[in-house]
Amino acid sequence: MVKDTTGWPALREPVDGLGELIRAAARHAIETAVAAELETALGAGAWARVLSRRGYRHGTQRRTLVTGEGSVTFELPRARLQQADGTTAEWRSVVVPRVVRRQPALDAVLARLYLSGASTRDLRRALAPLFGRRALSRSAISRVVGKLHAEYTAWRTRSLATEPLAYLFVDGQRLRVRAGERVTTISVLLALGVRTTGEKVVLGLQVARGERTEAWSTLLEELARRGLRRPTLVVSDGSRGAQAALEALWPGVAHQRCLVHKLRNLVAVTPPRLQAALVQDFRRISQALTPADVAAAVGDFRRAWAKRWSAAVVSLDEAGPGLTAFTRCPAAQWKSLRSTNGIERVFGEFRRRVKTQGALPTPEALLIVLWGTLASGGIRLRKIDGHDAFAAMEQAA
């Protein structure tokens, strides 16, 4: 018989595939971590006779934890610790809390599947090999979904008064949901803030029939009631509803039009044979490095295309001051402030994750799944380019 030198508990039965080997490793890792935790709490190892001992072991308890590789059964040691008043109390593990029966990541997966339209029966049948029928009861699903709803409600109503925000991005996206027996399309409005440290943070979500002024006003006024302060710059795709709502809430706020969307507008009114030249000239505006260069590029574009295709100039001028509002900010941040790509990426990642589901069951489920994907790190938001400029601005002030 080959001697085991790994330190893992020996498998008395033949390994049934890679899954069993992984579960054995997980069991060993859990028992090792808990043993080290208890030894620290007691101040002494098993059978050690030392004056610093703060309690005594008294047997073990068999526990089962559902992991990504299935159910793992292990022995959890028990002990009683001495208290300051001379009494003793049962020791509780932090590594394996008393009420935890599943890895938290599995609860997130379970909630997302449930909100995506899978019934309790479907989940129990599909995930029985992983969770086990006793571990995945109807009450377990209800508790997981209820917790998700509570966390979403707390996020949706949290105060924004202490958020150190500099910029605000707003945009909407049309997504599919199920209404009764039919699938319909609704708009999801999203407000994304940029902190003065450069991090992006989702501030609010709103379901609406379209991007009308009333819908945007509802979202923005709710954010203001929760303490959102007037930002230095707002970036949007040019939605008239968003522009009107922003002006009503913060008159005269600096408003940058997304240059990607504006270029699409220009291309749409230009004949195909002229579009390549138009794109090249417009990129001189979006890639200029100083405010003076931006102003010069806009002037050059206007003079050149007034002769070649005046409809392009009309479309350009429609943006007004919003075409170059980004030049009020540090040049190092221009790349992030010239477009709504930050929000577009959020919606793009979300669509990629739910495209196989067709349509989510309700508008509320859509918002919760979108929020849950963000909160769980499924969609990562990186800092804006040039975020170090914020520190330089504070030092200069």
Image: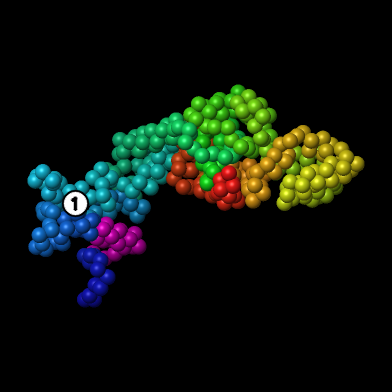
Residue 24 belongs to the span the image colors magenta: yes
Which quarter of the figure is the N terminus placed in? bottom left
Count every numbered label the image shows and give the total.
1
Residue 81: x %, y % from top left: 14, 50
Q: Which residue is mark 1?
A: 62
Rendered view: 19 above or below 322: below
* Residue 191 in view in this figure: yes
Rendered view: 122 above or below 36: above
Identify the element where label 1 is drawn. strand
Rendered view: 186 above or below 301: above
Residue 123 image-quadrant placement: top left
Residue 213 image-quadrant placement: top right
Residue 12: x %, y % from top left: 21, 65
Left-right relation of 373 to 26 = right
Residue drawn at 81 percent across, 46 percent down = 296
Q: Which residues are magenta?
A: 13-33
Closer to the camera, 193 or 183? 193
Closer to the camera, 121 or 27? 27
Left-right relation of 136 to 92 = right
Residue drawn at 54 percent across, 43 percent down = 196
Residue 61: x %, y % from top left: 17, 51
Residue drawn at 33 percent across, 52 percent down = 67
